[in-house]
Image: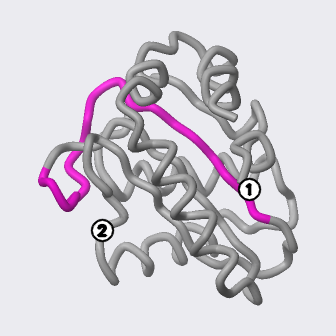
Amino acid sequence: MQIQSLLTQGRTLCDIEGVSKKRVLEILANTIAQDIPAIDADDLFRRLIARERLGSTGIGHGIAIPHCRVENYDGVIGALITLNQPIDFDSIDSEPVDILFAMLVPENAHGEHLQNLAALAGALNDSGFRERLRSAESDAALYEIAVSKD
């Protein structure tokens, strides 16, 4: 999996005010829906919330990978945001989150989405990569840092 195949500059936001887990998921849903008209922001938000109810997607080290399945789209979609202040995300290490990489997969995707999640988690497990993401000062810089991991 290449990060560049998941992201666009339009789905990469730096230094966002998150306030809460719910608000951040809403920002992610709206950002993705603005870039991909086939996706409904409200439906996506409900799906992301439903997934979080199953268990937090906070994987530790200040990282969360909210993810869900979507209808009306055949590809894998990513969105990346960094927050200006970390928020509580019920992460496995109890640390607040300031980097969120959302991933959406088609409704009919099966094992592929688990492989993509594992690859993404592996990339975000690199402390140097995380620090470079955190140091970005603009949306464009954040996007360039993210895709440079490939």
Q: Which residue is mark 1?
A: 33
Residue 149 versus residue 91 in the image, above or below? above
Which residue is denoted by mark 2 in the rendering? 56
- Toward the left, the furthest residue is 94
Say which label, 1 or 2, has the lower sequence index.
Answer: 1
Residue at the image point whose x is 32% and y is 54% from the top? 21
Which quadrant of the structure image shows residue 53? Answer: bottom left
Inter-mark Cα distance, 1 to 2: 23 Å
**Tag 1 near tag 2, CB within 8 Å:** no
**Segment tinted magenta in the rendering:** 76-94
| Residue type indicated by callout 2 | Ser
The secondary element bearing badge 1 is classed as helix
Across and down, in percent, residue 36 comes to 83, 55
- Seen from the viewer's position, the closer of residues 97 and 149 is 149
| Drawn side of residue 95 relative to residue 109, left or right | left
Left or right? Give the position of 96 relative to 83.
Answer: left
Q: Quadrant of the N terminus?
A: bottom right
